[in-house]
Amino acid sequence: MPKVWYKVVIVVVSVILVVFLALFGVLVLNEYFPEDREELTIDGESAKTLEIGKDINIVTYNLGYLSLDNTQDFFMDGGKNVRPKSATNVTKNLAAVKNFMDTQNADIYMFQEVDLNAKRSYWTNEYAGLKEDFKGTATYAPMFKSLYIPYPIFNTVGHVESGLVTLNEYEINSATRVAVPNSIKWPKRAVMYKNCALEERIKIKDSDKEFVIYNIHLDAYGTENKKTEQLDVLMEDMKAEYEKGNYVIAGGDFNQTFPDVDMEKFPIIDSSHYVPATIPKDYLPQGWRFAVDYTKPTSRLLNEEYSGNYDNTQLYIIDGYILSPNIEFGSVETIENNFSYSDHHPVSLKIKLK
């Protein structure tokens, strides 16, 4: 090879290296570093007052940024896709979820994986869409603030702003983003999510106590120790609130399965894919309880498009609730919808404050 070609190769490689290092530097400098507790903006107003002894209907639903419907797979679960082929999936799924809310008529909705501004959901402001017709308050807690996710290399995830959303018909005192330990190592951590809970404190009529709710989304891909540590931090917060005399629940996507799940009914088909850890049977303090529908799956693996058949689909029960002892449990139900709008099913809870 002539010397001139060596020089060309060296120049090209040098340029690529400089561009890569520059991009890497920009991403590292723009890493999202949330505080342990951050006060959140509360949008809208609520006139409804929470009363002791009255029914409360809550729904938790991981929306999969309205892009992981039953026609989709996902590259991190063994599939190939990063996003749907067009924005039609997102707009269709948003309309369907809003229709679902109309049929449920719940007092409180706790949503996870709601995009504010992201390539993967075609830049749709899903938070704005969800709160648009809701008669109450809306709160958004950021979990993803990534300038650019540079993988997969030839079809990158790109820019992501995403988080938790709680819609609440009851009058609330405050809303706070509560951080949990990060399970992702540097440098990948620079462009990845920072798990958290969205805490809301709800006023109670004729009482100086509060109903404290935690909308949660724990890590799916971290080590088992880190997942346990995330839940431990939240439980310490919840126990402290209960010791003050407050009523406490946590609901959402635990990304861990629950102690009484029948693993023969929901077996792990292929352990090379995502396998959730199991929360220990004796994990909760005395008097506390899980509220989980053990009869139906709440999530599926995204290694392929949904077949429409449970028998050849990897299924999980990873969405549910934790209740403090002063909450009267009514019922919990996973609402099956054929994974039509997300890779999760919504889970409805009915309770009362004792």
Image: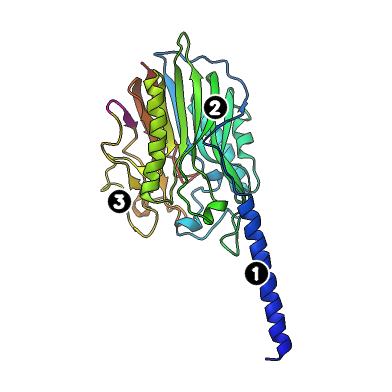
Q: Tell me the distance, in whole angstroms, between the alpha carbons under discs 3 and 2.
A: 38 Å
Residue 88, can we see it?
A: yes
Question: Which residue is identified by label 3?
Answer: 267
Labels 3 and 1: the sequence-earlier one: 1
Instruction: Name the residue rendered at 68%, 73% in the picture.
Output: 14
Question: Which residue is identified by label 2?
Answer: 175
> Which kind of residue does numbered mark 1 sit on?
Leu
> Which kind of residue does numbered mark 2 sit on?
Ala
Q: Position of residue 213 (x, y in %)?
A: 46, 27
Instruction: Name the residue rendered at 64%, 40% in the picture.
Output: 125
Prevailing SS of the magenta stretch = loop
SS label for mark 1: helix
Task: Judge the density around disc 3: few (<14), some (14-19), many (≥20) Cα neighbours within 10 Å.
Answer: few
Q: Where is residue 184 in the image (x, y as percent from the top left)?
A: 47, 51
SS label for mark 3: loop
Camera-side residue of 69 and 78: 78
Task: Judge the density around disc 2: few (<14), some (14-19), many (≥20) Cα neighbours within 10 Å.
Answer: many
Q: Position of residue 255 (x, y in %)?
A: 41, 44
Q: Tell me the distance, in whole angstroms, between the alpha carbons under discs 3 and 1.
A: 46 Å
Residue 148, can we see it?
A: no
Q: Does the magenta stretch include residue 129?
A: no
**Outermost residue to the right:** 4
Question: Which residue is identified by label 1?
Answer: 17
Camera-side residue of 56 and 13: 13
**Quadrant including the C terminus:** top left
Cβ atoms under marks 3 and 2 closer than 8 Å: no
Labels 1 and 2: the sequence-earlier one: 1
Q: Give the range drawn in magenta.
A: 286-290
Instruction: Name the residue rendered at 60%, 49% in the picture.
Output: 31
Left or right: 123 with respect to 61? right
> Which kind of residue does numbered mark 3 sit on?
Pro
Camera-side residue of 30 and 51: 30
